[in-house]
Structures are given as C-alpha cells and as structure tokens.
Image (cartoon, rainbow, N blue to C red):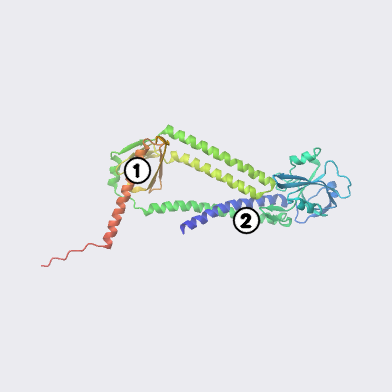
Amino acid sequence: MRSLGRTLVTTGVWAGLLFGAAAAYVAWQIQMVAGPAAPTPQTLSLAELIAKGPGKNLHVELTDVAFGPPTVETQGDRWECVWIPLRPAGQAKAPPAPAVLLRASRPRGQAQLDDLVKQSRLAVLVTNSLPQRSVWKARPSADLQRTYPKLDLAKVTFLAEPDLDFAGFVLTPDVVFDRTSAQIVWGVAIGLLSLGFFCLLLRWSQKSGAGKKAREACIRPEDEYTRGRLAVEIPQSEHRFKAWDCFCLARKYLLWAAVLFLVGLAPMSGVAFSLDRGSFLSAVVFALIGLLFFRWGWKVVKATVRLYSQGALHIAVCHGGLRWRSRSGDRAALWTEVVAGQVRQVATRQMGTGALVGYTGICTILLHSGETLYFTNDTITDFVRFASLAHSGHEETRQLSKRQFMNGARGQVFPAARPDPVRR
C-alpha cells in the first residue's frame, strides 16, 4: 500500500510538472494571438489584402485567390510544409517575386495539396506582426529563398493556417482566438503545476517522515556510562581524511557532471527547433531526454558534495562505537545508535594473472539521529580495515539485540515455573 502511494505521488510530480508546463506553453501561444486575431474572420479579397492590409483583425477569409507553383520542404520522405505563392484571381501572369506567401503545414502529400489549391475561399492568419516566438509566425526558409532569389521579405505578406495542431489535437480558430480560452488554459496550467509541486513536497515529506519513524522505532541508548567509556576507549583503528585523493575524485565527478549537462543541452536545442516547427510532441520528447541527462548530472553533483558534507576529517573505530571529527566538531555514536551500515566493494582483476588492477569501496552508515556518514576508498585511509570493523561492529550489536529480543519473547511464551512454597 505504501509503495502504491509513493508511485501515485511520483506520478503526480511528473504528470503535474510536465503537463502543467505544456498547458502553460499553449496558454502563452494563445495569449500572443488572441488579441490581434478575432474568432470570426473578416472577409477580404486578396487584392484588398495586398492594398490595405488586414487591419485590426489578422484572421482573414480570402476570396478571389489564385495559387502559384508550390515549394515543398521535406525532411527525408516526410513533408514538413508547403510554401504557396498567392495572387489575385484576375491576374493572368504570376510576378517573379510573389507579394503573398502561404505557409501550409497540413498537406502531407500530393493529394492533400491538390485539395487545398482547389478551394475558392481560404481562411488564413496574417503573421507579419506576430511575435517571433509564435508558432504561427511564418519564417522564410533557405529553400524558399533559393526558389525566389529576388524576394524582398519586407514587402511580402506571410500567411499561415489559423488552427493549431497540438500533439495531434487540432484547436479551431474560434477556440484559439478567443481571449477566454487563454484564461482557461492558464488556470489549467497553474492547477497542474500546483499539483506537481504539491506532490513534490509530499514526496520529500514522505522521505523525511519515513526516516523519522525509523529513528523513533529504535530505542535510543540512555546509558551515559557506555557513552562516557566510548569517549576514552582505545580505538581498534584510526583513519584520516585523504584530502588530495578526494579532490581528484571530486574533480572527476564534476567533469562527468559537466559532460552530462552539456549533453542535456543538445536536446534542449531540439525543443526550440521543434517549437519553431510547431511540433509539440517532438518538443516534449526532446525535453524529457534533456531532463533525464540533467537529472543524472545533478546526481553526480550531489555525490560530489556528499564526499565532503557526509565525510569526516578523522574517525576512530572502537569496540563500543565510532568517534569522529567533522567540520562542525567532535561526534560519537554507539553501535546501538547505528540504524544501518552498508559496505559495497568492487575489485577488478587482470584476466589470467589475477592481479588486482582496480578497487572501489563505499561504506554508508545511517545513524538514529538521521545523520549519514559516507566514506569511499578515496576519502579515508585504510578503507578496507575501516569497512570491515564498522560492518562487524554493527552486525554484532544487531545480532545481540536480536538474541535479547528472542530470549524475551521466549520468556513470555514459556514462563519459568515458580517453586512451590515450603510447607511448615
């Protein structure tokens, strides 16, 4: 049941943040165009549009339109968009440089393009005055400029389709150009982002609450005599911080983190490219890949900080527990105050000879207080002896506590028989 709750909370974090960011992006796009364009288009002939412009309403239904030869932009075998020059229907000859260009992204083949050029009335959006980050903004490509080398971009009226294709869902102009739609989508975005951040805080509280319950479930030792004896006890082994080796390891970690962050920036450029192309689904995929690399890089940075924040300048392993000196002062912990001790060692040997060519060791110690001690073979001297003594000390105490518990339980189930009173 707890695992199901954690899964739901984690799902809420990712779903709330990702879908909330997507909704915020859609609301931002709608807000940029909802003011200059009205849900109801104004009817103009193409000659009137060329002569007078669109006026205060960029949403236009064109009449008397003649289509010129299209320029198809492809990516592999897939059609990306089609640039179609437009001219008034009464104009017999097409000019060398068109005055009006339509960027159509809906046609994905010749049949759809043929259906488009057969239309006598055409609903379009004039994009010249739109912001550069708008998905409706028609940006001339290199292929278009090669087709029309004499094209003066300042004198051309660029048109686009008025609807919005959002991850396979087409939003019609009566929805996109309505100011109320932007407010509704902004509300949805704020709600989803709030849900994501709430689940994130809940996830953090679950982690801290689980650690607190685990610490409260363990009996804290109250024997001041044992603690005082630990302070003066002769240690079994002493270990010191290896500053230079730790610095070299941290430098290597930070180098890997920088590589991961740089690799994560590459998909982010794909996000910007996909948004410019109007492909939101591709932008989401690129964003997820980039966030994955950023997450790995952040984990490496946290591991680097952990080398210093959870280590010790000097640590002594004693029969009764641990004594260590950190940057905040001298500390001590009995073995009964250790919740868990994990040791992981990996040895790499040369094939054939069996000679040791590499060794990596990590020892993590979790205390009742919630503090964590973290050591590697690069951070303290004689790591193998330290890990062995720390693990054996914790295991002996744990086994002793287990035997005491079993003896106490056996005594409750099978109480000792009381002797009969002596008759006088």
Q: Which mark is residue 86?
A: none
Q: Which residue is mark 1?
A: 390
Task: Please state which of residues 159 and 309 is positioned toward the viewer in this rendering.
Answer: 159
Give coordinates of residue 375: x percent, y percent. Answer: 40, 40
Give the residue at mark 2: 188
For label 1, the SS is helix
Pick whichever, 327 or 281, lies toward us: 281
Asked if 329 appears above or below 400 in the picture, the reply is: above
Q: CA distance from mark 1 to mark 2?
A: 53 Å
Quadrant occupied by the C terminus:
bottom left
How far across and how far down the image is residue 233, in percent? 28, 40
Residue 175 in sight here: yes
The answer to which image quadrant residue 355 occupies is: top left
Residue count near mark 1 (Cα–Cα under 10 Å), binned few <14, some 14–19, many ≥20? many
- Where is residue 175 shown, x and y percent of the image? 71, 57
Looking at numbered disc 2 in the image, what kind of residue is underneath it? Val
Sequence-wise first label, 1 or 2: 2
Residue in the image at 31% along x and 50% along y: 399
Outermost top residue: 244
The answer to whether residue 128 is visible is no
- The residue shown at (46%, 57%) is 2
